[in-house]
Image: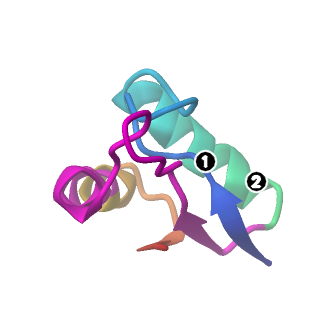
Amino acid sequence: MIDIHCHLLPGIDDGPRDWEQSVDLCRAMVDDGITRAITTPHFIDGVYENGRAVTGPLLAELIARRGDAGIALELDAA
């Protein structure tokens, strides 16, 4: 199963507060049968400025941490 709308990046809009919560969410998704997730933070000019410059490094870090934790969840960005 693919989740095409999830908030996994820490410290972004209404997603997890920190890396621990992000990794825990990845683990829970796999436990629920999800194999791929598309991170989709909110982007609203003047409210949520979550462009690629902000989200790209966070996604790269989450991919690394997910791998270190042995979690088989494919991650991409919207």
**Numbered tag placed on residue 27 in the rendering:** 1
Q: Residue furthest top?
A: 17
Residue placed most toward the observer, 70 or 43: 43
Q: Residue 43's x, y, as percent?
A: 47, 51
Q: Name the residue at 58% across, 46% down.
A: 7
34 in relation to 54, above or below: below
Quote the CA–CA distance across marks 2 and 1. 6 Å
Reading the image, the residue beneath label 2 is 31
Query: Which region is colored magenta?
Result: 34-62
Q: Name the amino acid type tagged 2.
A: Asp
Residue placed most toward the observer, 54 or 26: 54
Q: Are marks 2 and 1 in contact (CB under 8 Å)?
A: yes
Q: Name the residue at 29% across, 54% down.
A: 55
Residue 53 included in the magenta stretch of the image: yes
Query: Seen in the image, is 42 located left or right of residue 28?
Result: left
47 in relation to 69, above or below: above
Q: Circle 2: is it few (<14), some (14-19), or many (20+) Cα within 10 Å?
A: few
Q: Name the amino acid type tagged 1.
A: Arg
Residue 57 included in the magenta stretch of the image: yes
Q: Residue 58's x, y, as percent?
A: 26, 50
Q: Name the residue at 68% across, 62% down.
A: 5
Residue placed most toward the observer, 4 or 66: 4
Q: Secondary structure at mark 2?
A: helix
